[in-house]
Image (cartoon, rainbow, N blue to C red):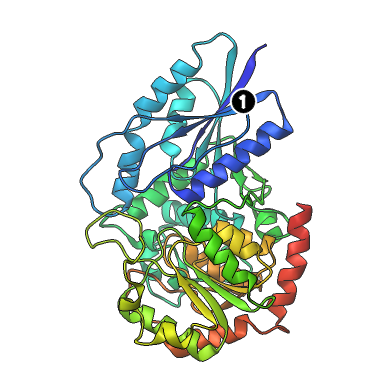
Amino acid sequence: MEQTELVFIPFPVVGHLASALEIAKLITKRDPRFSITIFIMKFPFGSTDGMDTDSDSIRFVTLPPVEVSSETTLSGHFISEFVKVHIPLVRDAVHELTRSNSVRLSGFIIDMLCTHMIDVADEFGVPSYLFFSSGAAVLGFLLHVQFLHDYEGLDINEFKDSDAELDVPTFVNSVPGKVFPAWMFDKESGGAEMLLYHTRRFREVKGILVNTFIELESHAIQSLSGSTVPEVYPVGPILNTRMGSGGGQQDASAIMSWLDDQPPSSVIFLCFGSRGSFGADQIKEIAYGLEHSGHRFLWSLRQPPQKGKMEFPGGYENIEEVLPEGFLHRTARIGKVIGWAPQIAVLAHSAVGGFVSHCGWNSLLESIWYGVPVATWPIYAEQQINAFQMVKDLGLAVEIKIDYNKDRDHIVSAHEIENGLRNLMNTNSEVRQKKKEMQKYIEKS
């Protein structure tokens, strides 16, 4: 029997890979005629281990490692070069895949950062679809800014660190420049050029699959329908709600055991994503803010990578060294400081009543799924504009900061943090009520 084969090309970071795998499972479950091959590109740092599936219709092909430039940051130049050098490897792998007469290649589903691979799909005469792992509002923002830049002479740099606002059709409120993705202003390392390149190529695909749902982003999705962009399909929420323990079963057990001893909805969970870390001064302000708030907390605290090294944050050997003197002793009855966190399992736990998040899109969807209110603390990528949308457009989060950026020297004060935590844990807040309502919608989706 002839197989109908789809090729998936995700960008090899955890959030993108996890979403790609979940949507692959969804497709094969909905239509068993499909089989899917997911090509894994190997980053020179980090790990893609733990990608597995119990589906016979999905398989992984890990491409051979490649030599990329000696850049030491995850810059636009590095990302573009990294994807481009994989083009011949993907081409060869697809040739190998289609050598059998029983396989009919039907299309490529390509990550938002891998649009160079549209050319490979064209060579094989099959359509490309884009998988956009952020929300519909951000998709519309990128398309709108690219159009204004290319055809109306918009100077994006006018918005850098600015309160100047831009009307964007997919947002209810005008978007201030201070929440634009930092890459938009990065000419030196190629971030701006990379974003504009990929966004232009979004317009070439047959359709765009977006990890969202109509009840969450009705305004954005309606703004995109009937426009000149390819058909947009809200296919979310795409979530991995399995209680995996990617950082170690022993760590997870200790964390969950501690949560079991806490009252319902009493704990604030602080977790800042796979690339989230802070310097010593900011860590002390967070600690004082937590202590003064008086709330119970579970804090995932990660050590920044060494300067000049392209690595993800890791665990501290001695966590007391970076915390205020006596902090762990004074907060021993109400708090726990950890390294890696099993985020899904923590958010699902009944003791958790609030989530201080970096506002990665997957984390925001997970918080809605489990009905946990969010306080925003974006760090990189498109997280600032996600935070803006959650606080200002949707009313689904409270603000600690919406314009924080890891590359600026700004320190968020303990007072700001304490106020944000108190607002987060206000049991009568409108945000908490809205979150409960949205949780019902996401479960139906």
Measured as percent of width and height from the top left, residue 15 is found at: 50, 51
The quadrant the N terminus occupies is top right
Q: Give the percent coordinates (x, y) of residue 154.
A: 42, 61
Q: Nearer the viewer, residue 143 or 332?
A: 332
Residue 349 visible in the picture = yes
Q: Is residue 30 above or below residue 310?
A: above
Residue 263 vertical placement versus 60 (above, below): below
Q: Which of the 4 quarters of the picture holds residue 259?
A: bottom right
Asked if residue 410 shows in the view, the reply is no
Does residue 227 appear to the left or right of 321 in the view shown? right
Count of marks placed on residues: 1
Compared across the picture, whether 282 is left or right of 31 comes to: left
Rendered residue at 51%/15% (across/down): 98
User: Which residue appears farthest toward the top when viewing the image?
Assistant: 101
Towards the viewer: 439 or 153: 439
Amino acid under label 1? Ser
Element type at marker 1?
A: strand
Mark 1 is surrounded, within 10 Å at the Cα level, by few (under 14), some (14 to 19) or many (20 or more) other residues, namely: many
| Residue 338 on image: x %, y % | 45, 68
Instruction: Please tell me in which quadrant of the rendered image residue 93 appears.
Output: top left
What residue do we see at 30% from left, 43% from top?
Answer: 44
Residue at 59 percent across and 55 percent down: it is 135
Q: Nearer the viewer, residue 9 or 243?
A: 243
Q: Position of residue 113 (x, y in %)?
A: 44, 45
Disc 1 target residue: 35
Q: Along the horizontal axis of the image, is 56 left or right of 404? A: right
Please tell me whether residue 161 is drawn above or below residue 116 in the rendered image.
below
